[in-house]
Amino acid sequence: MLNNCALRLIQWVLVFLIARLSYNIDTNGSSFYNGPPCPLVHNNLGWDQLTLPDGRLFTGTKRPIVILIDETNSSKLSAYVFQYILEAMGYRVQIGRRIQYVLGTEFYNSIVDFEMEINPQDFSATFTQLIDGLELPVTINFLGGLTNTRAIIDDALAKKRDVLFYFFTPATNNPTEYSVFTKDRSKPLTTDPESIVLQKLMSPKVTEDFPELPYLATRYQIDSDSMTYMLKRMGSNPPLSAPQAACEWIQQNQQTWMSWVPPVPKSVVSCPVGQGRYLIGASYSCIACPKDTYNWGGNNTQECTACPDNFDCPGGSTVNVKEGLWMPAPTNTSPVSYICPMHDACCKEHSCPPLSCAPQFKGTLCTECETQGKYLWGGACHSCASGGGSSFYATIVIAFICAFGLLFLPYEEAPTVELLFFYFQVARYIFESQVNGILKVAGISTFLAITSLNVDGFVSDCPLPIAGVQKLLFRFFLPTLILAYIVIIYFGLRSLQTHFPKVNEVLMRYAPHHLRGDSMSLICFRSVIVVITFIVMPLVDSSLLLKYVLSQVPQVECFGSQHAPAAALAIIIIIIMLGALPGLLCFTLYKLNLNNQIKYEDDGLTPIQKLFRCLYIIFKPEMYYMMPITIIEKGVVSILFAMMAKYDNWIQTNTYIMTLAVLCGTRIYWQPFVNHLEAYLNREIALGILAMIALRQYTDAYGVSTLTLVEIGIVIFLPPSLHLMRWIKENYYKHKETIHQVLSKAGSSVGSKSTRSQTQSVTASQTTSAITQQRSKLGVKGSVEKLNFGTRSTLRSGNLSRKPSLTPGEGTPLNPDHLQ
């Protein structure tokens, strides 16, 4: 038992020593350095008599107030005066001493509540300036603390040497005794440096535990004469201690310091703006709202309201909005913030007052240009030409190139296009609202804007001088233009085929091998199907923004005269994209399946059957119905991100996680595509989306850094990079023999043109024969193989396409059906 007690005692001693050294405070064991009680003849403050409803003293229920002092006499006097004032009010006080003169640690850790005197400078520089300015033949040595000074003086006196020194303690006798050093002895000579303003420190925790005391701490100020008097009393004969001198001053100047003490609170019914109604003792009092709280109510009957998320409340009635957000003028009792459509247009500091916008911007959500005649495009204000800018014409040309290129795309590559566009569009959704996120990286932002078909995100000047609802309508321009180009090309080619058959025959001779023999209707219809797969999300998103006018044009009244026609158009597009189109596809596929028209072979297909086969050929036979499902999936994702933008981050994040987890789970475990390369890509983009959601959560909680931006960039581009490597490797194994033959012929200078031509013909014939045999074994004629991208070179001749499946004896390292 004795050993346990000894161990416990040692433990407490160690804890005390560690705390003492960690917080730089000497508490004199557990006795502290408090001055003895200082009795007052008349204590009519009333605070020591204030009681709670249960009868307990109000100040008696409070924890002790900790005051810190250092070695200077003035610091001790200031602390003891404050101790006696607090004790007169009924509070308990504990005084500790600083071990080393290092400021901050004890206040940062909320160990100390007050330090009533902080000297911002020493006087060495002042004395040096006086000596140099007066050109005195004097050298001053600064001796340091009192202990060192006494030792030097005692040694000098013992050696009977003359000593002249200065210390902070004022002279005990009358200052006129200095007159022997002056020419005019009627005026005393003083050697004190100029007066400075002393500072006080108060812990932030005081405002929480003692909301009634900041008033006293602010008004507390001992004037120079009072401090000089107390210092003289400490040097009198007999000398007084610091607590005795402070107590004497308290007793003699009761009227002075009592004016610093706040009056005992009386119950109030309500409080004005910027103050809260707090229970102090048995009554309620109005107290100014401390930091991180606010009050906007004119007749407030409650305590100050805690500062909500996304806001900065320095105290009182002031409420500022944080970076990247916009705040309207206060109109009620609760502040409201909105995510800015363009982060750089709103608050760019740590916090900003209501209605703040960055330079060049103005208006609600800072969506208007400050300069008249400029238009907001690409996150900046531009002057616009009446005929449109270069970005507008570049968009027209790029859209045509895109539409023309889709005509040559092998239809078996359509799933890759659909998957990658979906992935990049979701990536933009995830990081679009993040301040200083990945979309701040110019190249990535432009790329994701292009894949989302958002013209406003990648233009560098003013395409057209439009704003408001007209600018929202412009978001339909690029997706619609791509579709329109395909239709125009179709009719152009049909007209060419009808009126200029020989020209059409020459053009088809130079067409890629996989397009030869296909009708114009089939080629264009396939391209339309591919385009629909990646314009669903941009069209639905634009329609939602146009229907609800969420944030892009907040100055327009919802469903007013300006908005109603555009909203009607948006509703029609949503109905078509998410209702009529999937419904029509479902009905068509149902009828095809009902009539046993779902065919994956080429034999005996009519032209109309070849057209309908575009709706299911990229999917497995048992999942022929996936086309309308993928369209609805994209529409749901667009609705999710557009409609959740008005909710707070917690609701948004949890909704995204639950919804996208289900969506990605189906993509990971349910593979509808006939080609195994798309199966790999489908899984990887699902994992990539989940990784991006996790990174978005992490950066929202811990901030965006260069490292996290790199990680996000890797996640965004890793799935397409892996898919490209697999695609190259797969095609290399599939066409290894042909590649080697081509390389061998290219390196040989022997043989004539006729011999090389004959060799190529034999090679092509052999390759065609081999593939025909493979198709016969699979029971598949043409289908996906016929649609493979190719050139007129020997490498891609003879229908050497990527197959939807391989024969049992033709496995590749990337075919999951043949992995050991």
Image (cartoon, grey):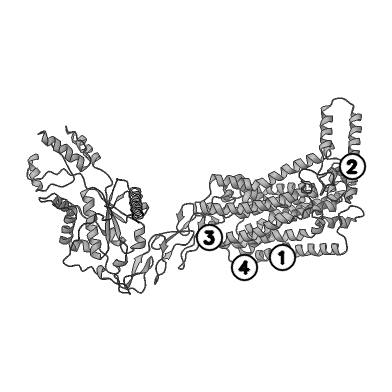
| Residue 479 seen anywhere in this rendered image of the structure | yes
Residue type, numbered disc 4 = Phe
Image side of residue 217 versus residue 533, left or right: left
Q: Secondary structure at mark 2?
A: helix
The correct choice, above or below, for 170 with respect to 85 in the image is above
Q: Position of residue 616 (x, y in %)?
A: 81, 56
Inter-mark Cα distance, 4 to 2: 64 Å
Circle nearer the viewer, 4 or 2 = 2
Q: Which residue is mark 1?
A: 575
From the image, state whether disc 4 or disc 1 is nearer to you: 1
Q: Position of residue 592 (x, y in %)?
A: 85, 62
Residue 559 is marked as: 4
Q: Nearer the viewer, residue 549 or 101?
A: 101
Marks 4/1: CA–CA distance: 18 Å
Residue 544, image x, y percentages: 64, 62
Residues at marks 3 and 1, CA–CA distance in whole angstroms: 29 Å
Q: Residue at x 27, y 69 (%)?
A: 264
Name the residue tied to disc 3: 338
Q: Earlier in the sequence, mark 2 or mark 1?
A: 1
Upstream in sequence: badge 3 or badge 1: 3
Residue 555, percent from left and from top: 56, 62
Amino acid type shown at disc 3: Tyr
> Residue 697 occupies which quadrant of the picture?
bottom right
Circle 4 crowding by C-alpha within 10 Å: few under 14, some 14–19, many from 20: some
Mark 1 Cα-neighbour bin, 10 Å: few <14, some 14–19, many ≥20: some
Callout 4: helix, strand or loop?
loop
Which tag is nearer the camera, tag 4 or tag 3?
3
